[in-house]
């Protein structure tokens, strides 16, 4: 197995861990201690790893030449009934993608400022961190259950349309698969634009 895929999966795992921990921290701040009680506010990847989403799917995407690597961790448990505020669930949902955007921005600025002085290997890892976190952020903002974007959407959906939530959640996984197969190409240019905006280089 090539060394680059090991680095990419390692970066992916840590990025999805940060994503899930962000959900848990914000939920705890808003009054729901479920994730904290379950021991899921740790950056230790072991409690968060999903064998399918964190290892098998990324490896499969790499080996099949899909052109993109993404995955997921075990979702942190959140009880929306404990959350303070009308938009508590949406805020918790947004925390995950925002954490990935923050990682992209931090490592992108690091590349801009210090790339000439950094070892080439570290520069390559920095680029991988930016790309993977942009993919995670934008993919999770798609408003299809069980992705975070759906929880944000449902929080602002008019009352007379809330009945759509149950069927969407029931078939959401299959809708996500359809999106990945047929519509991922429309997300790729946005990722490329944001990458160039953050790093100053073309993807």
Image (cartoon, rainbow, N blue to C red):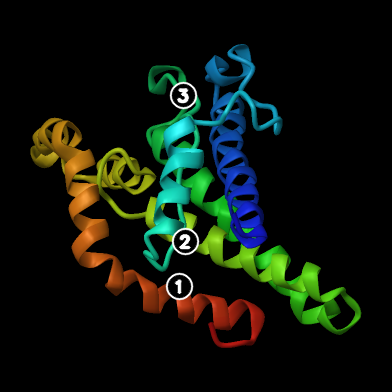
Proximity of marks 1 and 2: CB atoms separated by less than 8 Å: yes
The residue where tag 1 is placed is 191
Instruction: State the image coordinates of residue 203 (x, y, percent, origin top left).
Output: 53, 82
Q: Quadrant of residue 79?
A: top left
> Quick one: label 1, few (<14), some, or many (20+) residues within 10 Å?
many
Q: Write down the residue under mark 3.
A: 83
Q: Which image quadrant is residue 190 in? A: bottom left
Q: Give the foreground label among 1 and 3.
A: 1
Q: Give whichever of 162, 139 is nearer the camera.
A: 139
Cα separation, mark 1 vs mark 3, equals 32 Å
- Among numbered discs 1 and 2, the one appearing first in the sequence: 2
Give SS at disc 2.
Answer: helix
Whether tag 2 and tag 3 are in contact, CB under 8 A, the answer is no
In this view, 7 is above or below 79 = below
Label 1 sits on a secondary structure element that is helix
Pointer 2 or 3: first along the chain = 3
Which residue carries the number 2 mark? Answer: 135
Please tell me which residue is depicted at 71% across the width and 67% down the height of the picture: 126
Q: Is 8 positioned to the left or the right of 157 in the image? A: right
| Residue 181 location (% of width, % of height) | 22, 60
Which residue appears at 50% of the width and 26% of the height? 76
> How many callouts does the rendering have?
3
Which corner quadrant of the image does residue 147 belong to?
A: top left
- Quarter of the image with the N terminus is bottom right
**Residue 133 at what x, y percent from top left?**
56, 58
> How far apart in space, not on screen, are marks 2 and 3 (Cα)?
28 Å
State left or right for residue 26 relative to residue 59.
right
């Amino acid at each position: 197995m090539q060394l680059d895929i090991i680095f990419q999966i390692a970066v992916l795992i840590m990025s999805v861990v940060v994503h899930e921990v962000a959900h848990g921290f914000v939920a705890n701040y808003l009054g729901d201690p479920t994730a904290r009680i379950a021991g899921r506010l740790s950056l230790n990847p072991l409690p968060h790893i999903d064998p399918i989403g964190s290892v098998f799917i990324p490896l499969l995407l790499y080996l099949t030449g899909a052109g993109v690597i993404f995955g997921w961790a075990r979702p942190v448990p959140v009880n929306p009934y404990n959350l303070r505020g009308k938009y508590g669930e949406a805020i918790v949902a947004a925390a995950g993608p925002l954490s990935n955007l923050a990682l992209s921005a931090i490592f992108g600025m690091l590349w801009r400022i210090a790339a000439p002085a950094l070892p080439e290997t570290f520069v390559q890892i920095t680029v991988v961190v930016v790309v993977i976190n942009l993919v995670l952020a934008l993919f999770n903002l798609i408003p299809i259950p069980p992705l975070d974007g759906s929880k944000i959407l449902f929080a602002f959906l008019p009352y007379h349309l809330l009945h759509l939530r149950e069927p969407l959640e029931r078939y959401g996984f299959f809708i996500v698969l359809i999106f990945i197969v047929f519509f991922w190409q429309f997300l790729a240019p946005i990722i490329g634009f944001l990458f160039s905006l953050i790093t100053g280089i073309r993807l």
